[in-house]
Image (spheres, rainbow, N blue to C red):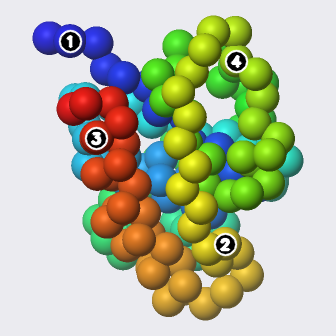
Amino acid sequence: MSQLKTVLVLCTGNSCRSQMAEAILNHELAGQVRALSAGTLPQPKVADGAIAALKDAGLPTDGLYPKTIDAVMDERIDLVVTVCDNAKESCPIFPRPVPRMHMPFHDPHGEPLESFVRVRDEIRATLVPAVRSALEL
């Protein structure tokens, strides 16, 4: 069996979009991808709306928590996906060259659950095939 490809999803707060992307990629591309997420300025906790939107879709939320980029810097990353413009601009230099992809999504933080659901569905519909293509899965 081939080794899992590791995808790092970066945003600013690591509390909404990147957390949902981590859970969705780990679910949709299980056995092919190991997704991690981190933030340039992580929030204290994952947004309740993100957790609710994931659970509403039957996606696991165990183990999701905001992390700094430093917490994942030593991981062997095969692809970095930035999901907000701020993370794209402040994306760190990794110890080895890493392909990058920028796919911005609306930030639903502080909005009603419906906004989180829309972003969740957009991530599922666009990010999953983009990662599959970028990693040639």
Dot 3 alpha-carbon crowd within 10 angstroms: few under 14, some 14 to 19, many 20 or more: some
Residue 59: image location, x then y, percent: 34, 59
Q: Which mark is residue 107?
A: 2
Mark nearer the N terminus (2 vs 1): 1
Q: Quadrant of the C terminus?
A: top left
- Quickly name the residue at label 1: 2
Mark nearer the N terminus (2 vs 3): 2
Q: Could you tell me if residue 100 is visible in this image?
A: yes
Q: Is 73 above or below relative to 31? A: above
Residue 49: image location, x then y, percent: 58, 75
Q: Is 34 above or below relative to 101? A: above
The reply to whether dot 2 and dot 3 touch (C-beta < 8 Å) is no
The reply to whether dot 1 and dot 4 touch (C-beta < 8 Å) is no
- Quickly name the residue at label 4: 94
Comparing marks 2 and 3, which lies closer to the viewer? Answer: 3
Quadrant hosting residue 43: bottom right
At 66% across and 67% down in the image, what residue appears? 47
Mark nearer the N terminus (1 vs 4): 1
Tag 3: residue type?
A: Arg
